[in-house]
Image (spheres, helix red, strand yellow):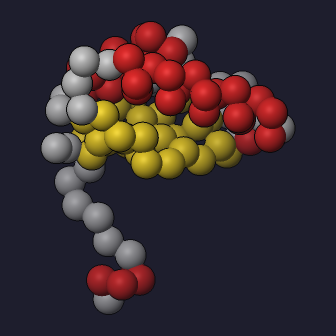
Amino acid sequence: MPKYIIERTVPGAGRLGPQELQELARTSNAVVDGLDSPYTWHQSFAAGDKIYCVHTAVSADVVREHARCGGFPADSVTEIGSEFGPWSA
């Protein structure tokens, strides 16, 4: 399945507290559980006024459906072409 990076504009995202992040995670998990398609949320990063998420889904449309059902913005949904890091040097 393809892996996607989702960019979400959320004013003050980088200043969200643990309880607010926990509520976002609960909402996301509930939506994932209710989808009629395989879906994995890998992790998210809150920085500045953005949240960046990495999810695996059968299509970008399913990623957008997750966002719609959860009430999350999805400003861009981009399929990851390749992954690399220190281990790939």
Among the 4 quarters of the image, the one containing residue 55 = top left
Q: Position of residue 3 (x, y in %)?
A: 27, 46
Question: Of all residues shown, which one is farthest toward the front?
Answer: 33
Where in the figure is residue 67, as x and y percent of width and height?
Answer: 44, 19
Seen at 24% across and 32% down, the residue is: 38
| Residue 31 coordinates in the image, percent (x, y) | 45, 20
Q: Nearer the viewer, residue 44 or 14?
A: 44
Give the answer, above or below, for where 25 lies relative to 82. Answer: above
Q: Residue 57, located in which quarter of the rendered image? A: top left
55 sits to left or right of 2: right
Which image quarter is the N terminus in? top left
Residue 15 sits above or below residue 87 on the image: above
Residue 4, picture quadrant = top left
Image quadrant where one finds the C terminus: bottom left
Query: Which of 8 and 35 lies nearest the eye of the viewer?
Result: 35
Would residue 79 be seen by someone viewing this image from the given angle? yes
Q: Residue at x 43, y 11 (%)?
A: 68
72 left or right of 48 in image: left
Q: Residue at x 29, y 41 (%)?
A: 56
Identity of the residue furthest to the bottom in this view = 89
